[in-house]
Every structure is written in C-alpha cells, then in structure tokens.
Image (cartoon, rainbow, N blue to C red):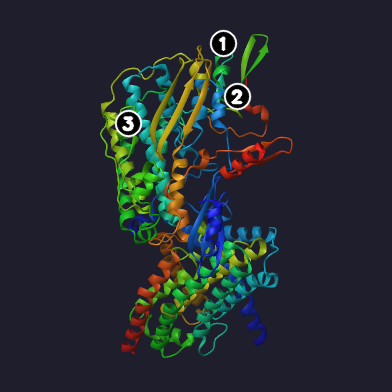
Amino acid sequence: MQEEELQKTEKKSAYELFFDIPVGPQHPALKEPAFFKFRVEGERVVGVDVDVSYNHRGIERALEDRNYIQNIYLIERICGICNVAHTLCYAQAVEQLHGKEIPPRANYIRLMMEELARIHSHMLWLGVAAHEIGFDTLFMYVWRDREVVMDLIEMLTGNRVTTAVNTIGGVRRDVSNEAKDKVKKGMNVLEERLKYYRKVALNDPTVNARCSGVGILKPKDAIRLCAVGPTLRASGVKNDVRKDDPYTLHDEVPFNVITFDTMDVFARVLVRIDETLESVNMVRYCLDHMPNGDVRIKLPLSPPVGEAISRVEAPRGELIHYARSNGTKNPERYKVRTPTFENLPSVSEMLTSKSDYEVNIADIPIILASIDPCFSCTARMEFRDVSKGKTWIWSLKELKAHCSKSRR
Amino acid sequence: MLKEIQKSLFKKKATVLYPFKERERVHIPEGFRGKIVFDRDKCTGCLLCARFCPSGACEIVTDEKGKRPIFHLELCLFCSQCQEVCPKGAINLTKEFELAAFDRKAFTIR
Amino acid sequence: MDFLLELLQILVFPGILFAIGLAFVYEWLDRKIYARLQNRVGPLYTGPSGILQPFADFIKLLAKEDVVPNEVDKPLFNALPIFALTLSLTGFLALPITGLRGVISFNGDLIFLITLMTLICIVIMYSGISSANRFSTVGAERAALQLLGYEIPMMLSAISIGILASSMWVYDIVSIQANGGWFLIGPGILGFAIFVLCGQAELERIPFDIPEAETEIVAGWLTEFSGRKLALFRLTKNVELLYLSGLVVALFLGGPSGPVMPGLEFILYPLYFLLKTLFVLFLLTTLRALFARLRIDQMVNFSWKYLVPLAILQVLIVRLVV
C-alpha cells in the first residue's frame, strides 16, 4: 500500500489508536534489506507499506562490463541459495544466443543439480519458517538434515553453496559412479526425513494453529498480483515453468506439479515439502537414466548478435533472464527478473486485514517468510548526488513531481 | 515430535566441535575448491587466468621470466575458473580451507 | 544469635546468595537440556561443560553500557528491574528447602506466593509500558492479556491443593505430604499438569513466550533494557524459574521431604529439594522443546476453553476426595 493510502486509514478506527510498527531492515524476523511499515490497531494489522530499496548492487550494469565467462560467477552471486537456478538460466540464455544444444548427459547433470538445490532451498525455508513460529526444535532438526544435501552438493561440485557447476555449453564437472551411489543413499535418508516432517506439519497442533488460515491469498488475487512459484501453487493455481515451458529435460523426467487449495501458509509449507519429495524422485530418475558421453561442448567466447530469453523455475518461483549480445565478448544488455520481487505485491495483500480475515502482529513473520523472501535482488532505483555525498530514493510520485517541476 | 525429542536426547550430537576438538569429523571431499596452489615452473605466461578471473584476484606482474600471475586470496571467489582455463595445469585448487591469517602476505600466492 | 542466624539464612543459605547461584546453574541446565533435546551441544567453553556460561553472560551484561532512552519514564524504568528481582527472591525465601518451613513462613503464605508471581507479571507490564517503545508496548499488552489467561487456572489448581491440605500454609501442605504421600500421586495429578503449563506461561517460555516473542516483536517488553537492567531482568527470570519449580515441588511433590536419617536432615532436605526441582525443570524444558509459539488470542482461547474448566474440575475432584 502506498503512503497516501496509509494516511487515509489514519482515523478510521473506532478507538483511533493506530500506531506503526517497523519491521526490517533490522528486525529479528527480517534480517534483510527491506522495510515494512505496519499500521496496527492493537494486535490487528490494518495497513502495510513496503520499501525494498535499501541495497542496490548494480549487478545488471556490472554484467555489461565483464565477459560471458566471468559473468557466470557474478550471476551466481545474485542469490546464494538459488545460485544453480541463476547460472542455469544464464547458461541457457547464452547458449540460445549461440544457437547450440548441449550434450544430453550435461542436461541430466544440470537438472539433478537444480533439483538438489531445490531440496536444499526448501529445507532451509522449512527451518526458517519453523523458527518464525517459535518452533526452534523443528528448525534445528531440519537444518541438521539439510546437511545431508549440502554434503552431496559439496561432493559433486566442490563447494557447499556457490556450486559454479553450470557453465556455457554444459556443466563443469562430471558425476562419477561412486558419487552416484552416495547421492542415492543421501536421497533415501532425505526421503525418510521429509516424510517425517510432513507428518509433523500435518499433526503438530501448534504448527497447525499458527499456519492454518493465516496469510490467505486467493487464486484470483494471486494471478492479479503476479505471484510466482510455490506461493502461487499454494493458492491452487497449477503453474510451473518446468511443466509449462520445459527446459533441460523437464519434459522427459516425470514429476507432478504440487498445488494446494487452502491458500494459506499451511498450504505453502506442504507445497514445499511435497515439492522436495518430488525433487528427490527426480534426482533418482536422473541418476538411473543418465547416458554416457560428454558433459560439455566448447563454445566461442563471443556469441553472435542477437537476443535471448530464458526461463527457469527457481526454488522461489519463475526466474527470467534476458540477454542481448552485440557480438563482442561482453553482453550489451542483461536483465534479471527475480521471483521475490514478483511476490512482494502478494505479500502485502496477505498482510492486510480484510473484512473476512484478520492479520495479527504475530502472523507478520510467518507470512513474510511464507513467500521465501530473498531480498538480495529487489532494489530498484536510487539517486546519487556525488557533490553532497548523499543518496536518496524517489517513488514514482516524487519522480513525476520532479519531472513536472523541471518542465516548468 | 515427543518421540523424536526423546530419541535425540541419547543420540550423538550433530554439532562438530570443530576448531578445538573433533577436527577429523570435518570431511572435505575430493575436488573441493580451496586454497590455490600455483606451479611457477609450468606457467608459460599465457595470461588466460587473468583474463577470465571474475573478481580480479589474479594480478599480472612482470619479473625475470616475463609476465606471470600472482593470486590474491582475499579477492578470490574459489570458482576454479583459472584452473579450468590453464592450458598447462599450473594452477590447482587444494582441499585446504582454513585460510585466515594475521598477515596479508599469506594471502598472496606466487 | 537468633537474629544473626536469621540474617545468615536470608542472605546466604538458603537465601539470596544460594538462590542466585542456583539460578545460574539452573539456567545452564535448562540450556543444556534444551540443546540436547535439539541434538546440539549447548554452552561448552566457559567452565567445565560451560557451566559458568550464564554467570559469564551476567558479568558481561553488567559491564555493558546502560542506555536509557530519552522518552522513557526514568524513575520507573530504573526501578523496575530491582523490583522484579526483589519479588522473585522474596518468593524464593518462602520456599521450604532446608526444612519443612521456609525462611519466611506464616499461615496463608500460599496466597502470598501466588500473588508474588502476579506482581512480577505486573512489573513486566509496567516495564513494557514505561519503555515508550512500540515493541515494548505490544509486549506489555500481551503480557497483560496472557496474565488474564493463565492466572485463574493456576490459582485454582493451587487452591485445590489448599483444600486437600485444609490449609493455605505451605508448611502444612508439605508436612501432610511428608506423612501421607505426594499429592501428585493421587488427586493432584490434573492440578499438577495445569500448574506446570501455567508456570510455563508465567515464565514466558515456548509455547507461551508471547510477550517477548523474538521473531515478532524483537524482545517484547525487554526491548529497551540494556546493560545492568537487562542483567537483572535475566536473573529475575532465572530465579523465577527456580522459584516456580520449587513451588511445584512444595505443592505437588512433597517439598524437600523424603526418607531421612536423623541428624542428616540439613543435608538431605536440600538434596531432595534439588532432585525434585531438577525433575520439574526437565519437564519444563521438554515442554519448551516440544511446541511452536502460540498466538496471543490462541493462548487466551486455550486457557479459557480447556485450562479453566479443567482447573474447576480439579477443585471438584479434590472436594469429593476430602
């Protein structure tokens, strides 16, 4: 909600006892560069104002200064947790510019890494969500079991988080047979644990009390506000880039798109747990059906002139990369659309009380967490006055006002 | 949940008491991307490493043998791109990961 | 001599010094058990197995800068931590530890003990409001609401014990149990469950740590307190934990009584007290590890829908037994 709308709600309460509660950038529930201002009446949230422009990193500009190989590692650092999705998307875009197909074994490895990263990301999220509702024991258990998949990723790629496994023309590392066995064993452990957590989420009375009926996002609103990923699927909309626009081998590897129709935080928890179970099966399928052969083709550094768009279902939702090449070794323009930015309108919708549904202060952290926010990619506009050393941010309104002033 | 809690009371602790005890429980797999080791004799000075280094950790200096790279670990991302492009295999990433030091010189690999 | 002895009892054993020392040990145990339940290690490096960690934390906080914001109600803000600690220590003095009688003991002291806990909660409420901080205000509001939720069932289950013993004197309650068996094994079991749950709410621990819910309102009513004041509040919470488990022991587990050899009472009684409070502490910690935090409306709902009727049922059962 914009500032002016917040002003409107100022004196509508029967008690006229509104006050604002700031959440973020320094708040235990939101240790991210974003600021949410909540207008509350007692425990009830009546309005919310979102400001995400705290940390502009200028990555898109920086990408234009580096060559295509260097950019892999910069792209990877847009978001630590979805790094595989980002590099996959980038590599696909550049391969599209080249107009080349990569070997099938590379595709299998890419898909497997993507799903391993999804398992890792969703388990991380489950722990964070448990922490947000004060369930620290579940948090500790989930993160302990997440170590299984972290170790597998480390074994396969040489690093726990920033895997750097996708490259232009394939993948950088092959999967050996003993690694395959280890991954299979790890998948068995994970499947058992995930089924257990599913049981906990379904049966634990306090988890149910905190998650059911909280943070409701109706399918109509979800589509209107362009929600993506698990947030959208938890609202009962069957939408998954992996099914709708299959990339790598998603048309070949069988999986189900998980949806839930309860539309609340509880649905988001279950969607993520079930998706992780699907991912476990997909990793198994990849291991069993992986053909032999090369994992990489050599491509020249500079792609021909052209444009490319690639889409990937990152753990947080649909990720879109756009690349334009002018034939040199640096991209001319690169644009990244990240899922969290798309989900922010829906989160402010979820956080506003309506006639049939109330938001409490206590629900704020879990609703915020329910979109799996990753604010590292959301800052948009900033002005810098070098002479005064001052930095400030303008909203659209201020920008328009400034323009009209200068026109006069 | 109660059962799980009771079980973990008697289970082995998940925490690794890493810096002082139980160092052996820290398992570093083969192919880990850690500290860079540079074999100066193999290097031919093709400068590909500097060209592809994403973070500028690879600096080119001129000495008696010609242009040679030095690596600044404090800037390094450990992406092993230099290892990949090196035609002579002069650059290797080892399993060593404890890279903290009091002296900046320790971060410079020649 | 009597006066000196009494002073010694109040100040050293089983009084203030003992209480504070034990409170630190109990915090350590609480953290350690909690960590083990979560498959972690807990405090480790300060002292053997980290036993000195709570003490080290306390010293560290004492040495830290004590910030008093401009907007706070200064006299209240400065005095409240001391009030809170005094209240919880006073409560501890009334617990039977070395004998069947506490240092302070008079007819009707059960009411006094329960009221002390309410007073601590009121101090918490005031400290939230006097902080003039948004998070603190919400925390204070929640503390008050929570008090409405848990106090009545707690009171009722304590009173049911009073009815069982036909006395509101802790000394009577303990000595009846010393002769005739614990109230826990028998008519008091429901009351025990209610009392422990409400105690968890009184201590503001998961699932009832709503007034200081970390992820929601930073530290709730504690947000503005720092340095010495925070140290005192933390100590208060620890002493309160000890005090509450001591009260549960006195009411349901027969206080410090147990099989004793004549002449060794002064060692064995405190030992029994420690063992029994440890059992209660273990229960409280397990509860803390078992649940997610409830929302304030859910907590009040739960308490009025289930705890209050059950507490009334407990009183009825007791009435039938007596």
Element assignment for label 2: loop
Label 3 neighbourhood size at 10 Å, few (<14), some (14-19), many (20+)? few
Outermost residue to the front? A408
- A221 horizontally vs A256: left or right: right
| Chain ID of residue with mark 3 | A
Element assignment for label 1: loop
- Image coordinates for residue C112, horizontal then vertical, percent: 53, 84
Residue B46: image tag: 1
* Relative height, residue A294 to residue C219 (above, below): above
| Chain ID of residue with mark 2 | B
Element assignment for label 3: loop
* Relative height, residue C271 to residue B76 (above, below): below
Kind of residue at badge 1: Cys
Q: Which residue is mark 3?
A: A245
Looking at the rendering, which quadrant does residue B110 occupy?
top right
Nearer mark to the viewer, of 1 and 3: 3
* Front position in the image: A41 or C97: A41
- Image coordinates for residue C195, horizontal then vertical, percent: 42, 75
Label 1 neighbourhood size at 10 Å, few (<14), some (14-19), many (20+)? some
